[in-house]
Amino acid sequence: MFKIKTYNKISKSGLEVFDDKYTIGDEVDNADGAIVRSAALHDEVFPESLQAIARAGAGTNNIPIDKCSEQGVVVFNTPGANANAVKELVIAGLLISSRRVISGIEWAKTLKGEGDAVGKLVEKGKGAFAGPEIKGKKLGVIGLGAIGVMVANAANHLGMTVYGYDPYLSVKSAWNLNHNAVYINDINEIFANCDYITIHVPLTDSTKNLINADTIAKMKDGVRILNFSRAALVNDAAIKVALESGKVASYVTDFPTDDVLGVDGVIAIPHLGASTPESEDNCASMAAKELMDYIENGNIVNSVNLPEVTMPRSGEHRICVIHKNIPNMLTKITGIFADDGVNIENLLNKSRGDYAYTMLDIGAADVAAVADEIKAIEGVIKVRII
């Protein structure tokens, strides 16, 4: 029996992925795995039993990645599971950044009580809320992951010319990107050419304040900027100055901050990007499948702190080792099997940054004794027998 701790209200259909080998709930102790949405886990004390945490969503800022790596806890996310939901809201953001629909709706409310004069007043006042169409305009998509590619393709179908930038473009994303998109190697081309710019990159030290006074200065006058990724990707002070001067015509963000709320030209959405029942179901289901595959088979797919490692089962036992990515580690691990006369039927080893993961399928052996010997190797963090 395995235990899964939930830190938020998780989609019922997602939790139904777990079979009767699992006990699930927010009161579970000594959990083998955990599913979290937005709950902050930085101050959480993880039990030694914890093998993995799955974030039902893409961002993992609420999870202490370094601490998890040090303790041998695999952290998963669910890339692409909420991509369609976010894409749809980004397209809405493109439209409302141009057409001043929200301002017009608010103004129309003020006409309540004017009776038969409403129609004439609407015709007289609507000119204040005119805005350009997006067809034929240039859209710069910064970040071509699951969401960025879907946004780029949708915008292309709406008649926009799409510029895409991503220095880490994956093969999968490249295959999925519409052939009409213009892939560029220099982000400054987006700043110089695009009427609309939408950001779809993770928040890191290198991407923080990606949109700032210097980058805004390189943009076209009247540019419209959309941020559906993380608040800190855009410098609030710089965007306010640019809105006031007219350099930026509109800023749409799904991550409101106190600094931008109420500022003319800011359309602040209360983080609704993935707030659809379909998205929550998809994220929870993917998270559950990732946890089950790791707990039961040792396979790692969509981890943010360890390499992707999957291997068909063979042999009588599977031993999974999380260890530091240091020289001669694999030699030391396999040497134990040779010394004990244990046959390794299959092996896979991959690394990611400072950490590595080794899976070994072996024949008949005293696996507990072998595991103890592996644990004694300097640099080994966690050993599991499946």
Image (cartoon, rainbow, N blue to C red):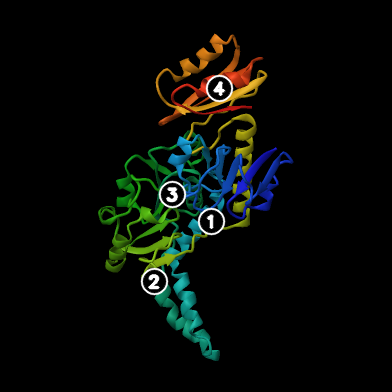
What is the distance, in whole Å, between disc 4 and disc 3 at their CAs?
A: 45 Å
Q: Is residue 18 visible?
A: no
Counting from the top left corner in percent of width and height, residue 201 is at: 42, 47
**With respect to residue 253, does 182 lie above or below?**
above
* Amino acid type assigned to the residue bearing label 2 in the image: Gly
Identify the residue at horizontal 63%, vertical 43% (top origin): 288
The residue that disc 1 covers is 88
Residue plotted at (60% across, 34% down): 294
**Viewer-nearest residue: 131 or 310:** 310
* Mark 1 vs 4, N-terminal side: 1
Comparing 15 with 254, the one in front is 15
Label at residue 262: 2
Nearer to us: label 4 or label 2: 4
> How far, Cα to Cα, is label 1 from label 3?
14 Å
Which of the marked residues, 1 or 2, is nearer the chain's N terminus?
1
Precedes in sequence: disc 1 or disc 3: 1
Q: Are marks 4 and 3 in contact (CB under 8 Å)?
A: no
Q: Circle 3 sits in a helix, a strand or a loop, which is it?
A: loop
Q: Are marks 3 and 2 in contact (CB under 8 Å)?
A: no
Give the quarter of the image for residue 33: top right
Q: Quadrant of the N terminus?
A: top right
Q: Earlier in the sequence, mark 4 or mark 2?
A: 2
- Amino acid beneath label 1: Glu
Q: Residue at x 63, y 56 (%)?
A: 277
Give me the disc on residue 200: 3
Query: Which label sits in the foreground, 1 or 4?
Result: 4
Q: Are marks 4 and 2 in contact (CB under 8 Å)?
A: no
Residue tagged 4: 372
